[in-house]
């Protein structure tokens, strides 16, 4: 019974994420993180970071990849069964795509009207900056943990992701290489892995 | 929109599986591959592609999936869109599943642990880079910066759910756009 409930929660969570993601994969990551790490506490920050890394390295869209992975992880952790883990990843993957399906088929139907809709374009001008903020928040949450007791916040560093000064150096150099050097994310992850083995 | 060319469904599936298997990083990385694979077969014309991309971006969800739904639908209607979508996600689904199962068995391996210690900080900058690129494109006014900064603070520091923020800003944006249209 508990397992069925978990499947239901997983399906609903990813359906909602799929419906409210504007701005592609990275925006999706911020919603997945909020729902899965913060709201449901199904997985920890550091496991989520690992999942993002794997989703980046493997082919396919990052948002869908992380849904597949999270679905497996949640059910496998809860039950210890690989089979239920696979069912979990199927559930999350299909649920996250379902809203796109319905909405895209509607859009295709009213293609010409939609294309020229100033109302929609106007609305999106407001949504896009918010998406930028949400992606930024996803990055911040992987660095800082904020806990509130009443009205006083306590800000700590997520030590699983940033255990020492070396990890800050890795962050800064990967950012420089990615932003100014336009380095491919795949190579940056491989470089991170090699440096991790050398440094730690 | 549908042209019912009678392209076999399995062919739609395999072509999109090929696109899915060779797109690393998702989103924009897949556009050139989609273009090569689909226009080669005459499934979409080159001048259609920008429209498809724009629409797929503005709909919720992941662009790659949205493009598959659109193109599949154009070829064989609803069945086509199902075939294309399943095709484009199957390779990554299998790969991720294999890694997830493998990783649970190997994550306590000291080498894997050290590698991931190095990878984790890199991942955060991989999220930050596209964010800044997006900010440069879509935050050109003071109110856009305010919206971006406000939602960052609400989510990261005040633990507000992003979904509520998106709903609020859609209502706000829609109302303001309606108001402007009427004037």
Image (cartoon, coloured by chain):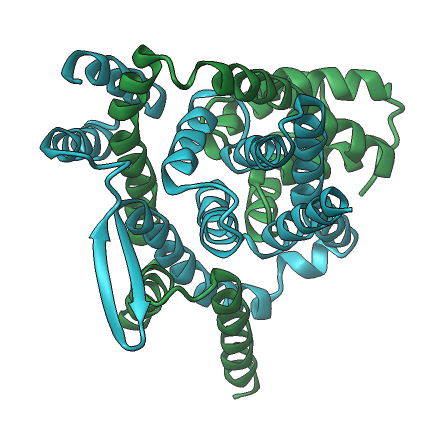
Chain colours: A cyan, B green
Query: Residue B1 location, x and y as percent?
Result: 80, 43
Tell me if residue B47 comes above or below residue A112 in the rendering. above
Vertical side of B103 occupied by B164: above or below: below
Q: Where does the image place residue A180, in percent across and percent down from the top left?
A: 18, 33
- Residue A122 visible in the shown view: yes
Nearer to us in this view, A135 or A109: A135
Residue at x 41%, y 62% (from the top left corner): A130
- Would you identify the image quadrant in which residue B81 lies? top right
In the drawing, does residue B87 fall left or right of residue A146? Answer: right
Residue sitting nearer the eye, A51 or A96: A51
| View extreme (bottom): residue | B183
- Left or right of B76, for residue B47: left
Residue B79 figure quarter: top right
Comparing A167 with A2, the one in front is A2
Q: Residue at x 66, y 36 (%)?
A: A93
State left or right for residue A54 relative to residue A67: left
Residue A183 showing in the rendered view: no
Picture residue at 76% right of the left edge, 20% below the top: B13
Residue B131: percent from the left, percent from the top? 33, 47
Q: Position of residue A131 (x, y in %)?
A: 42, 56
Foreground of the two, A50 or A133: A50
Report the residue at 57% width, 41% height from top. B62
């Amino acid at each position: 019974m508990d397992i069925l409930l978990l499947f239901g929660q997983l399906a609903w969570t990813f359906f909602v994420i799929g419906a409210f993601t504007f701005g592609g994969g990275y925006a999706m990551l911020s919603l997945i993180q909020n729902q899965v790490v913060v709201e449901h506490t199904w997985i920890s920050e550091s496991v989520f970071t690992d999942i993002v890394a794997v989703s980046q390295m493997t082919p396919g869209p990052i948002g869908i990849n992380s849904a597949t992975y999270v679905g497996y992880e949640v059910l496998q952790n809860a039950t210890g069964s690989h089979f239920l883990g696979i069912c979990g990843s199927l559930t999350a993957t299909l649920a996250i795509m379902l809203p796109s399906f319905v909405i895209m088929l509607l859009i295709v139907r009213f293609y010409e009207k939609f294309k020229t809709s100033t109302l929609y374009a106007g609305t999106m001008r407001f949504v896009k900056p918010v998406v930028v903020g949400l992606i930024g928040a996803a990055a911040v949450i992987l660095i800082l943990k904020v806990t509130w007791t009443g009205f006083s916040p306590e800000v700590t560093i997520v030590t699983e992701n940033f255990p020492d000064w070396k990890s800050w150096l890795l962050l800064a150099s990967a950012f420089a290489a990615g932003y100014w050097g336009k380095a491919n994310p795949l190579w940056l992850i491989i470089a991170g892995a090699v440096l991790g083995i050398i440094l730690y | 929109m549908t042209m019912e060319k009678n392209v076999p469904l399995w062919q739609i599936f395999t072509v999109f599986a090929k696109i899915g298997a060779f797109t690393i990083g998702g989103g924009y990385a897949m556009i050139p591959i989609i273009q090569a694979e689909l226009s080669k077969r005459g499934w979409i014309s080159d001048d259609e592609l920008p429209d498809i991309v724009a629409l797929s971006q503005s709909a919720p969800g992941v662009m790659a999936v949205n493009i598959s739904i659109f193109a599949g639908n154009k070829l064989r209607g609803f069945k086509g869109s199902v075939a294309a979508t399943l095709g484009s996600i199957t390779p990554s689904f299998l790969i991720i599943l294999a890694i997830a199962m493998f990783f649970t068995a190997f994550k306590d391996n000291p080498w894997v642990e050290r590698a991931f210690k190095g990878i984790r900080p890199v991942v955060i900058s991989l999220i930050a880079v596209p964010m800044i690129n997006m900010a440069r494109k879509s935050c050109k006014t003071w109110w856009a910066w305010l919206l971006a900064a406000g939602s960052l603070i609400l989510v990261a520091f005040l633990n507000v759910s992003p979904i509520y923020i998106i709903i609020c800003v859609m209502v706000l944006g829609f109302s303001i756009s309606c108001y402007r249209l009427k004037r």
